[in-house]
Amino acid sequence: MASRLNVFSGAHWEQQVGYARAVRMGDRIEVAGTTATDKETILHPGDAYGQTRVI
């Protein structure tokens, strides 16, 4: 069985609800609730590649 690695960002929700920003299982990485934003706007709207590079 592949080992599991949880990746946390330090957001308060992670501890409150048991949430991990990303999870790695073997050679697979799943990402959730991570957006390409700054304090003012969404970065690279409509551009999945550009958003991924920011994240």
Image (cartoon, rainbow, N blue to C red):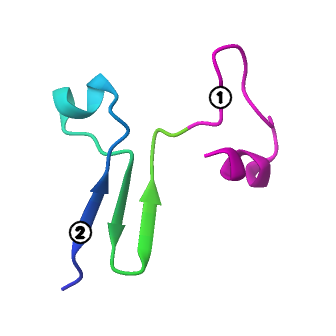
Q: Residue at x 28, y 23 (%)?
A: 12
In which quadrant of the rendered view does residue 40 lie? Answer: top right
Question: Which mark identifies residue 4?
Answer: 2
- Dot 1 falls on a residue whose secondary structure is loop
Q: Is residue 18 left or right of residue 8?
A: left
Q: Residue at x 24, y 82 (%)?
A: 2
Q: Is residue 34 above or below residue 4?
A: above
Residue at x 19%, y 39% (from the top left corner): 18
Comparing 20 with 8, the one in front is 8
Which residue appears farthest toward the top when viewing the image?
A: 40
**x and y, in percent, of residue 50 in the image:** 78, 48
Q: Callout 2 environment at 10 Å: few (<14), some (14 to 19), or many (20+)?
A: few
Report whether 8 appears left or right of 4: right
Nearest the viewer among 31 and 53 is 53
Residue 15: % across, % down? 19, 32
The stretch in magenta equals: 35-55
- Is 49 colored magenta in this rendering? yes
Q: Secondary structure at mark 2?
A: strand
User: Hey, which residue is sitting farthest front in the picture?
Assistant: 10
Q: Position of residue 28 (x, y in %)?
A: 43, 74
Mark 1 — residue? 37
**Residue type for callout 2:** Arg
Q: Amino acid at mark 1?
A: Thr
Quadrant assignment for the N terminus: bottom left
Q: Main secondary structure of the magenta part?
A: loop
- Choose top left, top right, bottom left or bottom right for residue 43: top right
